[in-house]
Image (cartoon, rainbow, N blue to C red):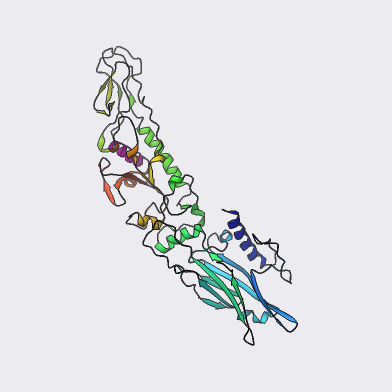
């Protein structure tokens, strides 16, 4: 959170407290301001005129958003949250009821406020959105409003306060993202506490610098579990005979492959050592079957001696996607787990693992997913809608979701 953003939020919250008789620190970026004549907080804006020996002043005292996390939201908002403005007429309190408020939308993407205008010392509004849901790969524009308070006086004069000279009620990035979920009507509606800067850049394949997760840190935990399980599958050959064992027949199995993987069967992860012999298929010149004792009858081979090191993070092709990005990517559902920050797409085709084809690696990733999240939540795809067998040459990623 920037200092400016934090400052405005703290100032707005302080102004609300000031209505109860407390004082506030100065507005960020401005010189220290005095308080009102009665010891109250300095107004956000004011307009005044003289009537005889007395000055009548229209003052806007505070603007606050009353929503989830409102104590830190300042003047950023989403539709459904109430926006409350409070004001007064100094030296003519009987005119408070005649204060006229209007919340004026800025830009075609911002809908009219509800209500559009209201009279009295306090006015409560709600925003509306005209942002479309056709999908895009760029951030949505923020909803924004200009607040206007006016007071008609006898003789045709009108006092008017516009807040501010530039936009005042404007969505910050967190709320622009939250607004997308409201516009789409998704089941997952993230609160401000579920919006965060991702721990790793690879987790963000959306349009913003922030992501939403149903569980904070969920993507990081899912990737860590997938990496652990995938690495285990690359080192699951079984040492059948301890290294150095003598008196074996030449066809005695010294090392056997681990459990079969989906449609591709058992995949060995060991190269023969000494005069031990590979029994089975070779892939890229590397043994994928059992290792036999060979002519000298000695177990020379240590299981899993290739010791591959893989960072699945380098092969994540998609993780969090905001609703607009998700639709632009071709997803057929607005409730994709990607929009909930609880899914990873992993494309292992660029991995270089001795003795493994790209199709075998795809099946290994799916098998790791099956172990971590279950078979129903781990599957191989091409694009966002085509489901395939893991060894299909057309497959381009494994989707794993919570």
Residue at figure coordinates x 26%, y 13% from the top left = 295
Q: Position of residue 111 (x, y in %)?
A: 46, 70
Residue occupying the point 52% across, 59% down: 172
Q: Residue furthest front?
A: 165
Q: Is residue 6 visible?
A: yes
| Residue 3 spot, x, y in % from top left | 60, 54
Please say if 154 is above or below 297. below
Which of the 4 image quarters holds residue 278? Answer: top left
> Relative to residue 293, is residue 123 drawn left or right?
right
Decide whether residue 248 is among the magenta residues.
no
Instruction: Decide if residue 58 is in sight here.
Output: no
Name which residue lies at 35% across and 54% down: 329
Rendered image quadrant of residue 31: bottom right
Q: Residue at x 66, y 82 (%)?
A: 94
Percent x, y of residue 263: 25, 38
Q: Quadrant of residue 76?
A: bottom right
Q: Main secondary structure of the magenta part?
A: helix
Residue closer to the observer: 337 or 392: 392
User: Relative to residue 204, is residue 89 drawn left or right?
Assistant: right
* Image coords of residue 309 (percent x, y): 40, 32
User: Outermost residue, bottom direction?
Assistant: 155
Query: Looking at the image, is 166 positioned above or below residue 401?
Result: below
Q: Nearer the viewer, residue 400 or 134?
A: 134
Query: In the displayed structure, would residue 265 be above or below residue 384?
Result: above
The residue stretch that appears in magenta: 359-372
User: Tag count in the figure?
Assistant: 0
């Amino acid at each position: 959170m920037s200092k400016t953003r934090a400052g405005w939020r703290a100032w707005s919250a302080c102004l609300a407290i000031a209505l109860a008789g407390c004082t506030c620190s100065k507005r960020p970026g401005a010189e220290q301001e005095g308080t009102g004549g009665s010891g109250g907080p300095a107004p956000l804006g004011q307009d005044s005129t003289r009537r005889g020996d007395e000055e009548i002043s229209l003052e806007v005292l505070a603007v606050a958003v009353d929503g989830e996390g409102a104590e830190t939201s300042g003047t950023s908002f989403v539709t459904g949250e109430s926006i409350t403005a409070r004001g007064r007429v100094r030296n003519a309190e009987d005119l408070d009821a005649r204060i006229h408020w209007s919340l004026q939308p800025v830009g075609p993407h911002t809908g009219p406020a509800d209500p559009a205008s209201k009279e009295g010392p306090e006015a409560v509004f709600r925003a509306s959105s005209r942002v479309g849901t056709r999908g895009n790969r760029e951030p949505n524009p923020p909803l924004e409003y200009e607040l206007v308070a006016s007071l008609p006086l006898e003789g045709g004069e009108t006092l008017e306060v516009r807040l501010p000279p530039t936009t005042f009620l404007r969505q910050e990035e967190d709320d622009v993202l939250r607004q997308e979920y409201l516009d789409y009507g998704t089941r997952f509606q993230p609160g401000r506490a579920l919006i965060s800067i991702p721990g790793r850049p690879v987790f963000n394949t959306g349009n913003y610098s922030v992501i939403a997760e149903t569980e904070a840190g969920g993507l990081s935990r899912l990737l860590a579990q997938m990496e652990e399980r995938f690495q285990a599958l690359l080192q699951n050959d079984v040492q059948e005979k301890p290294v150095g064992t003598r008196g074996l027949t030449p066809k005695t199995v010294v090392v056997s492959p681990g459990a079969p993987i989906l449609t591709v069967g058992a995949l060995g992860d060991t190269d023969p050592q000494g005069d031990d012999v590979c029994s089975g298929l070779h892939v890229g010149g590397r043994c994928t079957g059992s290792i036999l004792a060979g002519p000298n009858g000695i177990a020379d081979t240590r299981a899993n001696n290739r010791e591959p090191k893989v960072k699945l993070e380098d092969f994540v092709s998609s993780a969090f996607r905001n609703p607009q990005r998700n639709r632009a990517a071709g997803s057929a559902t607005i409730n994709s787990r990607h929009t909930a920050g609880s899914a990873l797409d992993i494309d292992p085709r660029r991995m270089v693992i001795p003795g493994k084809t790209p199709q075998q690696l795809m099946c290994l990733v799916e098998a790791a997913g099956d172990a971590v999240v279950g078979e129903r939540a781990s599957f191989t795809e091409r694009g966002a809608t085509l489901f395939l067998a893991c060894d299909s040459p057309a497959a381009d990623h494994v989707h794993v979701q919570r």
